[in-house]
Amino acid sequence: MAGSASPLAMASTGGEAVPPAPVAGAAPVADATPALPVLGPPSTWIVTTPATVLDIPAAPETAAPEAAATETVAAETPAAAPAPAPEVFDTTGDELAGWINEAIRVMRAQGVPVDGGDVQAIRTIIDKESSGNPQAVNRWDSNWRAGHPSKGLMQCIDSTFNAHKLPGYDDIFNPVHNIIAGVRYTISRYGGFDGHPGLKSMLKGSGYRGY
């Protein structure tokens, strides 16, 4: 009957289906399992010596090139500005001028109201009191007789000097120290040089009077 299976195709030993017989003229189907290579007997094997492995040393590490040393140029320190010249009050230029200038600078730094306008008054007092001798000691007036003679450029007695000196200016025979005490006494006692009895007397045409 057309379309019916062959009796051989249906036969099986265990009831399982039997694969169909190959069709006449069809190309054989290649086995999907690859064939293993066939090695001949050991006598036919060719043993090759493996190539020698060369021990090639590693390339030496190349040190990184050192950075070129940079010369450090020290920054030039700007030259310090020269100290300003001290202010000059007495321009006479003699030794006494140096003492007066220094005394005025010290007093101004301490707030004493004195300046270059007082230079002539200071010089006049010094000239009349001691003739410019910082070691002068009066041995003839009432102060001498009372046991406390006048001393130095502006002829201060010890108690007057000690009451009007500035700290650190303690030597009655030092010309700068003596000027400081004499000027401060004049300002304290007479209110300034305008009230100084000797200078006032001279302005009136009379002689100098001690203070």
Image (cartoon, helix red, strand yellow):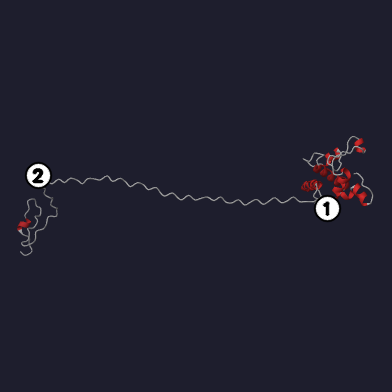
Neighbour class for label 1 at 10 Å: few (<14), some, many (≥20)? Answer: few
Dot 1: what SS?
helix
Calculate the distance from the C-alpha at mark 2 to the C-alpha at mark 1.
Answer: 137 Å
Considering every residue shown, the one lying at the far front of the view is: 94
Q: Quadrant of the N terminus?
A: bottom left
Numbered disc in front, either 2 or 1: 1
Toward the viewer: 148 or 126?
Answer: 126
Please say if the residues under marks 2 and 1 sit with CB atoms less than 8 Å apart: no
Toward the viewer: 211 or 136?
Answer: 136
Q: Amino acid at mark 1?
A: Gly
Name which residue lies at 4% across and 58% down. Answer: 7
Would residue 11 appear left or right of 211 to someone viewing this image? left
Dot 2: what SS?
helix
Neighbour class for label 2 at 10 Å: few (<14), some, many (≥20)? Answer: few
Q: Amino acid at mark 2?
A: Ser
Q: Position of residue 108 (x, y in %)?
A: 78, 48
Considering every residue shown, the one lying at the far bottom of the view is: 2
Using the image, determine if residue 208 lies above or below residue 20.
above
Residue holding disc 2: 43
Residue holding disc 1: 117
Q: Position of residue 93 (x, y in %)?
A: 79, 50
Toward the viewer: 170 or 71?
Answer: 71
The tally of labels here is: 2
Q: Position of residue 30 (x, y in %)?
A: 11, 57
Q: Quadrant of the C terminus?
A: top right
Q: Position of residue 147 (x, y in %)?
A: 89, 34
Lower position in the chain sequence, tag 2 or tag 1: 2
Label disc, if present, on residue 19 of the rendered structure:
none
